Image (cartoon, rainbow, N blue to C red):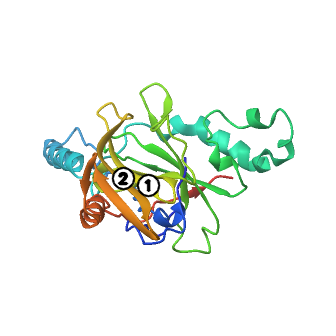
Amino acid sequence: MKIGKTAKSHIATAMIISATFLFAGCGTITPKEALPDVVEKDNSNNESLAIENDIKEENQDNDITSGNDVTDNQKAPTENTNIYNDVLTQYSDMVQNDFYVNLRDSDSYESSFGKDIGLEIRTHKQDIYYTFYDIDGNGTMELIIAGGENAVSNPAFSPWNYDLYGYDGTNVVHIFPEMEFGYRTNFSLYGNGVIEVFYSNSAAESGVDFYNIGTDGFTPELIDSFTSVGHLEGDEPVFTYTQNGNEISEEEYNANIQGYEIALTALDWIQIQ
C-alpha cells in the first residue's frame, strides 16, 4: 500500500502525461489529544466527589460529541497501540537489513520480509515512517505506514502512504486486504472518517472511491465511487465521467470529489529505525 503527498488534482487535462500527475497527492489527518485528565479522587470529601462527578459528566458529553465529529474531537483510544508492535518490528527488521538488498538474487529474498509488509514498499530503499490515528473515532487507533525522504529538513514533509492496519479485537488486520498500495493505487485520510482510495489503470483511465470504516472497526464500506475514462476523437482526448456508474459532467465530477476532501493538518510521523 502506498502514499505520496502533494496537492492532488482530479481535473483531467487535455493531454495526460501520467497517472502520477492525476493522483500526485492527498490530504492527511492529525491525531487529536486525549481528553483532559480528571482530577484525582478524594473519597473523604463529599464536595470534591460532587465536583468530580460534574467533570465526568462533562467529559462524557464530550465523548458523545467526538463520536459525531471525528475531525475535531477524537476520543481517547481504549486499545493500546502495542497491538501493532509485531508489524512495526517487521518494518524495523527490513530497515535495519537495508531492505534485504544483499539477498535480492537469492531464493530467500521474498521470505525475508515480514508477512505484513506490502510488495511496493520493498522496491527501493527509503525512510519508513509510521503514525497512529483513530479514523472512525471508535477509540481504537489505526496504524499507517508511509515512506519518504528528508522529513527533518523539509517542514512540508508529507510521505507516501503504503499501508493501513486496523484491529479486529484479536488480530491486526489490513483495512484493505485485497489492495496493494503504491504507484498506481493509493489512499488519503480525510475528515469525518473518510478514506479516499485513488487508482489509475492507465494514463486515460482512473478512479476515486470513498470509504468509511464499518461498525466492526476494521471493514471498509464503500460510500461513493467515481471514474474518469478518456479516448481519442481524432487528435483530441475526450473524457467520460461517472459517479456510481451514472454519467456526470466534469464540473460535477470535480466538485463532488472535492466535497469529501476535508483536509487536516499533518500527521505526527515517527521514523522507523
Residue 218 visible to the viewer = yes
Total number of numbered labels? 2
Q: Are marks 1 and 2 in contact (CB under 8 Å)?
A: yes
Residue at image position (23%, 50%) is 66
| Image-based side of 168 in relation to 130, left or right | left
Where residue 227 appears, x then y in whole percent?
A: 36, 53
Q: Which residue is mark 1?
A: 206
Residue 227, which numbered label?
Answer: 2
Horizontal and vertical percent for residue 181? 54, 47
Residue sitting farthest toward the top: 170
Q: Can residue 9 be spotted in the picture?
A: no
Of mark 1 and mark 2, the one earlier in the sequence is 1
Frontmost residue, 83 versus 27:
27
Q: Locate residue 262: give its quadrant.
A: bottom left
Q: Amino acid at mark 1?
A: Ser
Q: Residue at x 47, y 62 (%)?
A: 23
Residue 208 image position (x, y, % from top left)? 38, 53
Which SS class for mark 1?
Answer: strand
Residue at the far front in the pictured view: 234
The residue closer to the viewer here, 235 or 4, is 235
